[in-house]
Amino acid sequence: MTSLRKDAKLALLEGVQLFAGFSKKELAAVAKAADQLDYSDGVYLGRQDAAGHEAFVVVSGQVTVRRNGRKVASLRRGDVAGEMALIDGQPRSADLVADGDTSVLVIPRREFSGLLENNAQLSNKLLRTLADRLREADRSLYG
C-alpha cells in the first residue's frame, strides 16, 4: 500500500473526531508521532484483554472490532480504534482485526503522552472530546 505524504497524513488527522479542535501545529505533532503500517486480512492489530500501547487511525481498508468474539463495529478511513490506550494503557476492551488489506496510522502512547504533558491546552481539548463521546454513548444506550 502507498504511504501517505506528510500533507495527506495531516489532512486525514484533521477529519478525525478524536482530534477535533486541535490546531494545525498540534495535529502536525500527532502526525509526526504516527507511523503508517499495513496489515493483511485477518491480522490482529490488538487483542482483547492485552495491554494497549497505541491507537490506530484507519487510512484504507477496514478494521473489525470484536468484543467477546462478537462483531460490534466496522471502522473505515478516518475512524480511530484503541484511543483509550493513549490515555491509560489499560488492557484493550476488544479485538481489532484487519478486514481485507488495511493500512493504519499507529499513534504510540509514549509519544502521545509526551505531547499531552507538554501542552495543557491540548490535554483539555482531548478531555472535552472524550467527554462528548462518552455523553453520546450514554444517550445512545439510555436515551
Image: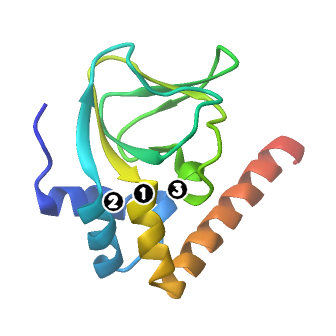
**Chain-order first, disc 2 or disc 3:** 2
- Which label sits on residue 40? none
Three-letter amino acid code of the residue under disc 3: Leu
How crowded pointer 1 is (Cα within 10 Å; few <14, some 14-19, many 20+) is rated as some
Circle 1: element type = loop
Three-letter amino acid code of the residue under disc 1: Val
The reply to whether residue 21 is in sight is no
**Residue under pointer 3:** 86
* 1 and 2 marks in contact (CB < 8 Å): yes
In the image, 143: left or right of 45? right
Circle 3: element type = helix
Q: Toward the viewer: 141 or 49? A: 49
In the image, 38: left or right of 110? left
- Which label sits on residue 13? 2
Task: Decide: is 44 above or below 113.
Answer: above
**Residue under pointer 1:** 16
Alpha carbons under labels 1 and 2: distance apart: 5 Å
Quarter of the image where the N terminus is located: top left
In the image, 39: left or right of 116? left
